[in-house]
């Protein structure tokens, strides 16, 4: 894509705002789970409206990478420019969250390595290993997508949805109730995430109508998400039907994407907001990485003030957490991005400085 597509920038901001809200809701959902089932259900219902955020990030990745003009670069060059960047970012932020979570405890290099390769230093960093693995296959997926017909792409998306999202959910639910169904025929999560790249490219490239049936199915999905989540959450919270692999998330995500595509440019958005969105689109990755640390620190400071408060006061606290997290994560990310750009300039000019000194 030569020029920025405004509605894609808008979707990127919509997605990150939803993700921040997911993690704010998460604090309160975990608090309510064992003490107040009604409050837990209400917050879970509200949470279901935010769950298009992560799928949208995968879809936007597909659009960006599959429409990017090929510069005939080899795989090693692609790896160095794209994959290595994400690996370094993942290592750096994993280190930050690992140190924060181990304050006052012994820090082990082996434990750190085991954590970031088999788990995560904190819950939201699961996204980084997944995106790294996806990027390893981007050059090959790009060649595939450039030669596939619209009909074949539709078929692939549907097949992966059925054998991935649907069969995966049935298999995991059956295990909760002491049975095992469809496990051998369920596609791995990585393929489900890659399917979002295909879906994003498909919705971007082709004209797809927003029909009544799509809207109805989206509403039904949003209603069923919290109901199923509450039903399968027995001894611990189970977000199977709220996560990005859920079969219930895909239709609301499609509708949101199509609404942005059709109406975003028609809405009179203040120029200040438009400018902010376009200038800070590249900072979204850092907003994603920083915001959980802000929420965790904020909760550590304010937890004592909101324990055993009425539900209406908790709603106010949720709003406060959300606003502060959004403002601070964007502010820190803007500053951080400038620091990164400055370091890149210094590193690029470093060899020239050495040569000039020698001369």
Image (cartoon, rainbow, N blue to C red):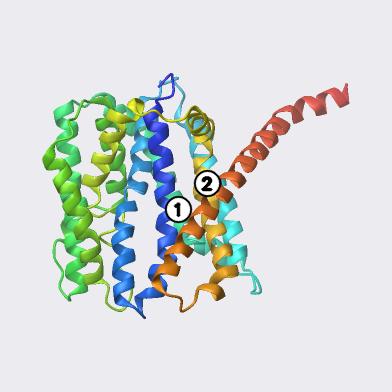
Q: Marks 1 and 2, Cα distance to the nearest angstrom? A: 9 Å
Total label count? 2
Please name whichever residue, 323 or 172, is drawn nearer the observer in this view of the structure. Answer: 323
Residue 237 visible in rendering:
no
Q: Secondary structure at mark 1?
A: helix
In which image quadrant can residue 338 be found? top right
Q: Secondary structure at mark 2?
A: helix
**Image-based side of 110 in relation to 132, left or right:** right
- Residue at the image position 48 percent from the left and 60 percent from the top: 120
Q: Which residue is mark 1?
A: 20
Q: Position of residue 239 (x, y in %)?
A: 30, 63
How packed is label 1: few (under 14 Cα within 10 Å), some, or many (20 or more)? many
- Residue at the image position 39 percent from the left and 28 percent from the top: 268
Q: Position of residue 289 (x, y in %)?
A: 52, 50
Q: Position of residue 204 (x, y in %)?
A: 29, 29
- Residue at the image position 29 percent from the left and 37 percent from the top: 257
Q: Earlier in the sequence, mark 1 or mark 2?
A: 1
Q: Position of residue 104 (x, y in %)?
A: 66, 74
Give yes or no for contact between labels 1 and 2 (Cβ–Cβ under 8 Å): yes
| Screen quadrant of the N terminus | top left
Please name whichever residue, 45 or 126, is drawn nearer the observer in this view of the structure. Answer: 45
**Image-based side of 128 in relation to 153, left or right:** right
Please name whichever residue, 269 or 73, is drawn nearer the observer in this view of the structure. Answer: 269
Question: Tag on residue 349?
Answer: none
As drawn, 350 above or below 117:
above
Q: Which residue is mark 2?
A: 287
**Image-based side of 52 in relation to 149, left or right:** right
């Amino acid at each position: 894509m030569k020029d920025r597509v405004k509605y894609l920038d808008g979707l990127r901001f919509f997605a990150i705002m939803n993700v921040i809200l997911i993690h704010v809701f998460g604090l309160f959902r975990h608090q309510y789970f064992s003490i107040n089932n009604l409050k837990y259900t209400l917050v879970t219902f509200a949470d279901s409206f935010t769950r298009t955020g992560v799928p949208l990030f995968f879809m936007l990745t597909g659009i960006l990478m599959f429409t990017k003009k090929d510069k005939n670069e080899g795989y090693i060059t692609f790896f160095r420019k794209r994959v290595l960047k994400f690996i370094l970012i993942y290592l750096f932020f994993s280190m930050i969250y690992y140190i924060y979570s181990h304050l006052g405890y012994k820090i082990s290099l082996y434990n750190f390595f085991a954590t970031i390769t088999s788990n995560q230093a904190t819950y939201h960093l699961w996204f980084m290993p997944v995106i790294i693995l996806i990027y390893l296959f981007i050059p090959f997926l790009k060649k595939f997508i450039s030669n596939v017909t619209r009909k074949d792409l539709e078929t692939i998306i549907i097949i992966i949805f059925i054998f991935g999202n649907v069969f995966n959910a049935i298999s995991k639910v059956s295990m909760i109730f002491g049975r095992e169904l469809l496990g051998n025929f369920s596609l791995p999560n990585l393929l489900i995430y890659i399917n979002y790249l295909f879906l994003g490219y498909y919705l971007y490239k082709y004209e797809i109508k927003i029909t009544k049936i799509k809207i109805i199915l989206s509403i039904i999905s949003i209603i069923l998400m919290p109901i199923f989540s509450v039903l399968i959450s027995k001894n611990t919270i189970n977000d199977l039907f709220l996560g990005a692999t859920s079969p219930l998330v895909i239709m609301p995500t499609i509708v949101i994407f199509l609404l942005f595509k059709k109406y975003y440019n028609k809405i009179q958005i203040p120029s200040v907001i438009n400018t902010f969105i376009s200038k800070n689109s590249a900072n979204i990755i850092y907003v994603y990485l920083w915001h959980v640390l802000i929420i965790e620190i904020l909760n550590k400071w304010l937890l004592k003030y909101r324990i055993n408060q009425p539900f209406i006061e908790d709603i106010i606290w949720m709003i406060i957490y959300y606003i502060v997290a959004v403002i601070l994560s964007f502010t820190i990310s803007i500053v951080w991005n400038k620091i990164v750009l400055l370091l890149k300039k210094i590193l690029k000019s470093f060899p020239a400085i050495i040569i000039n000194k020698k001369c």
